[in-house]
Image (tube, rainbow, N blue to C red):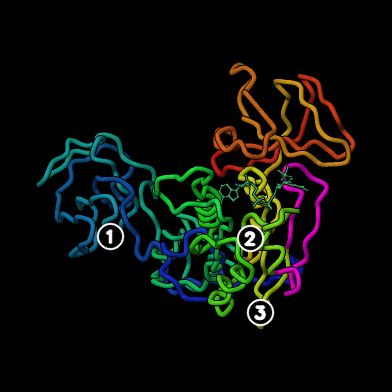
Amino acid sequence: MLDGLRPTPAADLDPAEALGLVLAEPVASRVDVPAFDNAAMDGYALHAADLDGPRDLRVVDDVPAGRVPAAAVAPGHAVRVMTGAPVPEGTAAVVPVERTDGGERRVRVHAPPAPGAHVRRRAEDVAAGAVVLAPGAVVTPPVVGLLHAVGRTAVRVHRRPRVVVLSTGAELAPAGAALAPGRIHDANGPMLLAAAREAGADAVLGPVVPDRPGAVRAALEPHLADADLVVTSAGVSAGAHDVVKADLAGAGVVFTRVAMQPGRPQGCGRLGERGVPVVTLPGNPVSALVSWHLFARPAVRRLLGLPDALGPVRRAVLAAPLVSPPGRRQYVRAVVAPAAEGPPAAHPGSHLLGALARSDGLVVVPEDVTALPEGAVVDVLLVRDDAS
Ligand SMILES: Nc1nc2c(c(=O)[nH]1)N[C@H]1C(S)=C(S)[C@@H](COP(=O)(O)OP(=O)(O)OC[C@H]3O[C@@H](n4cnc5c(N)ncnc54)[C@H](O)[C@@H]3O)O[C@H]1N2
Ligand code: MOO
């Protein structure tokens, strides 16, 4: 499924709205940055003839940022300038106010600056015509700043992928509702919605889908016209009411078992005329989130135009021993902590959302490894953006 995914169509967005998205055009600057020679310090612009020793100079102009000097600076004269103000023609250097007596009509320069000091030259940052960003660059806060500095109010990026999240299951009660016996709150839906948004998607959560034949297809139908990816949870294993599987198996989604724990039952495929990619995650919350990281998040990244790498993997030392089933690659929730903080509590149950929320990494235990002692060196897949 990943192989068939292309980045979303390009759209013109306000740079700040494009945060985290990938450029679909090269950006060339139409202007010089800075656009004019200007002062890097609050001080006085001096002529080249006044740089060889202490001086008493006449202050002939006072230029705050945002104004322009009236005339060039001449020998024996000084022009008071503030940081960012255009320096007058003839400026050889700016002396910071701290190296003068700070005078307003006359100024005593105690220690003259070196030629060129504290003057920011026109185009020294970006020259007009220069390509400042290439297609594929990610819009970060400094990129937003750069785009505005070169005068852009819109930038062409691959638009946010539209991800639809659906929870299925007769046991799920609406958010905030009192729970009747046997029912639970929908944790997966909001969790996957948040995960999709964290990954950069424009995600929506549909109403909970009941365990009724046809209900999953009916819930999906309105989204097939514009969704870029659909992610469902639950209803994919061997239960008598596993509606996702029952509804979608004949409609282009393949269900299978993956040799991993958690997250064994999985499905994926394409639906509708547009071939909307669908990933059907298992219902246990931990299984759902681990599967999200391994299968759905890479799809979102492809749609964004980013590499679909799983995320940073770090080597770490186990603080407690662990066991793992033979023949299944296990992803063990872990807290990546400095050694001094001691062993984190860990438990492998795939229904344990509390332990999942405390973890920031997944220890990857290969299929053929069934036990690892405390102190073993392992690979940890970092699953939180702030975990590195
Ligand atoms: N006989 C078998 N039983 C199970 C198998 C199996 O192979 N044979 N696989 C187990 C594994 S592994 C997993 S994982 C789960 C996956 O089951 P489903 O994807 O079909 O999901 P459900 O059975 O509907 O629910 C499982 C579990 O998750 C809870 N759940 C579901 N949705 C939510 C939600 N939105 N928020 C919070 N919790 C949710 C649900 O109540 C169940 O407790 O199947 C095993 N069984
Ligand atoms: O594989 Mo299930 O996903 O263990 O919980």
Residue at image coords 62%, 30%: 335
> To which residue does mark 2 refer?
301
Q: Is residue 34 above or below residue 52?
A: below
> Image check: 259 left or right of 203?
right
- Determine if the magenta segment contains residue 259: yes
- Asked whether the viewer can see residue 25, the reply is no
Q: Give the range drawn in magenta.
A: 248-267
> Image check: 104 left or right of 92?
left
| Mark 3: few/some/many CA within 10 Å (<14, 14-19, 20+) | some
Check mark 3 vs ligand 1: CB closer than 8 Å? yes or no: no
Which of pointers 1 and 2 lies earlier in the amino acid sequence? 1
> To which residue does mark 1 refer?
86
Which quarter of the picture shows residue 104? top left
In the rendered view of the protein, which quadrant contains the N terminus?
Answer: bottom right
- Asked whether the viewer can see residue 46, the reply is yes
Residue at image coords 60%, 71%: 228
Q: In this view, does 192 lie above or below 15?
A: above
Q: What residue type is labelled 2?
A: Arg
**Marks 1/2: CA distance?**
44 Å
- Determine if the magenta segment contains residue 228: no
Give the percent coordinates (x, y) of residue 17: 42, 64
Give the percent coordinates (x, y) of residue 347: 67, 29
**Marks 2/3: CA distance?**
22 Å
Q: Which amino acid does label 3 sit on?
A: Gly
> To which residue does mark 3 refer?
272
| Mark 2: few/some/many CA within 10 Å (<14, 14-19, 20+) | many
In front: mark 3 or mark 1? 3
